[in-house]
Image: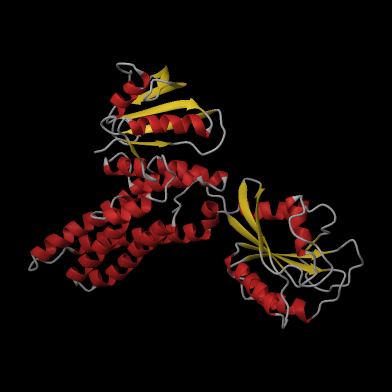
Amino acid sequence: MKTIAAIATAHGIGSIAIVRLSGPEALPLACSLTRKSSFSPRHATLSSLFDATGALIDEALIVYFQAPKSFTGEEVVEFQCHGGMMVASMVLEALLAKGARLATPGEFSKRAFLNGRIDLAEAEAIAKLIEAKSEEAAKILARQMKGELSRFVNEARESLLEILAYVEVSIDYAEEDLPEDLIRQMEVKLTALEQRLGEVVAVSEQRKGLMQGFKVAIVGKPNVGKSSLLNGLLHYDRAIISDVAGTTRDTIEEEMRIGTHLIKIVDTAGIRHTEEKVEQIGIARSKKAIEEADVVLALFDASRPKDTEDREILDLLETYASSKHVIPLLNKTDLPKVFEGLENALHVSTLSSLSCVVDTLREHLDTKRMDEGMLLTSTRQIASVRKAHEAITEAKPRLEEAELELFAFHLNEAIGALGAITRPYGVDEMLDKMFGTFCLGK
């Protein structure tokens, strides 16, 4: 297999940059670049680096990982050179000139998978840990990187395989009836597993925001102070503020940190009836933002009486009451209060402190924390566990009716679905697509 090389650190200026080599020629290439005869495994060695012309490139730390005790399971050498794009690029170019091939995105992790160093669940955890949106997400992904999800999947598969073994024997010896106590044991195991998988899927769906970042939408009719609220939360003037209704024509998205959570906050166009085509498009996007949001900040003007537009927004939010967390806000409380209703609303003024909004958001997002317990971290994982859960649900009646062939078919479906999370078979194309989304050098 060809020796591959890539810069493993992010582009930009930094104190160090790492260039990584993996493959059968990794050590000879490192010796050629440094003019040394050998390196001790897992020892950092300070060495000069030279290009093909003999010119000095840099003085760097060289770390050699001997196969199979490396991330990829192959011979691996890392060059920890001075930061900045030029030095790392020169080291990479020198390695390519000596015969290495530029790695494709995710190729190091793909080789680790193919060499049995990690499974797909651990590979996904590595990729997602880099982009974690909260402290809780980082903790969950760190546990999965150490095999927590893999152990969960393997235990579930082992339970199914054990049941399947009994069934396959019974199919081969159809004249023999299964003992009643054995059928009961299988039913108990399947019911427990069905419940466990269902709980994991439900919790993972509810807490997607931990992995992807929570989305918070600011909604209301025109001129209630939505853009002022966004600017106040961000502590700078991101959105244009005007007394003219319909100033905000499109959604404005920004990221900010609330407690330990990174959230995406969305300012939307004011929702009202209008004949203006461009504004209609903005209003449609506002409604879409509500559908996609985890939390909705519903803003109303306390200094104006409740009108038809306010009622329509309240009716719209009522349709999402079961699926969205809505926080009603009465703005402009520095003026005489005229708006009636919304006794549970937070009273705010976007011209002063918004700490009550921040505190309320943080308290709600903290309820989504999950430092312990199993959480699926990707749509692919959730779909696989859901498929396994559905297959088990379909299998149970077949066992009760002694339709063992169909029962075994559904169990094999469940086993295949769970296996897709960790180590499926015959999926080269899928692996190329999956690992191709990784960072270059990872």
Residue 363: percent from the left, percent from the top? Answer: 67, 52
- In front of the other: 309 or 83: 83
Residue 336: percent from the left, percent from the top? Answer: 92, 67
- In front of the other: 251 or 199: 251
Q: Is residue 238 left or right of residue 68?
A: right
Residue 314 lies in what quarter of the image? bottom right
Residue 138 appears anywhere in the view: yes
Residue drawn 73% across the image and 78% down it: 272
Residue 398 lies in what quarter of the image? bottom left
Residue 31 lies in what quarter of the image? top left
Quarter of the picture containing the C terminus is top left
Q: Would you place residue 285 above or below residue 262 in this image?
A: below
Residue 347: percent from the left, percent from the top? Answer: 81, 61
Residue 99: percent from the left, percent from the top? Answer: 30, 33
Outermost residue toward the bottom? 275
Q: Is residue 257 left or right of residue 348?
A: left
Outermost residue toward the right? 336
Residue drawn 29% across the image and 50% down it: 423
Q: Would you place residue 61 above or below residue 361 in this image?
A: above
Residue drawn 55% across the image and 56% down it: 209
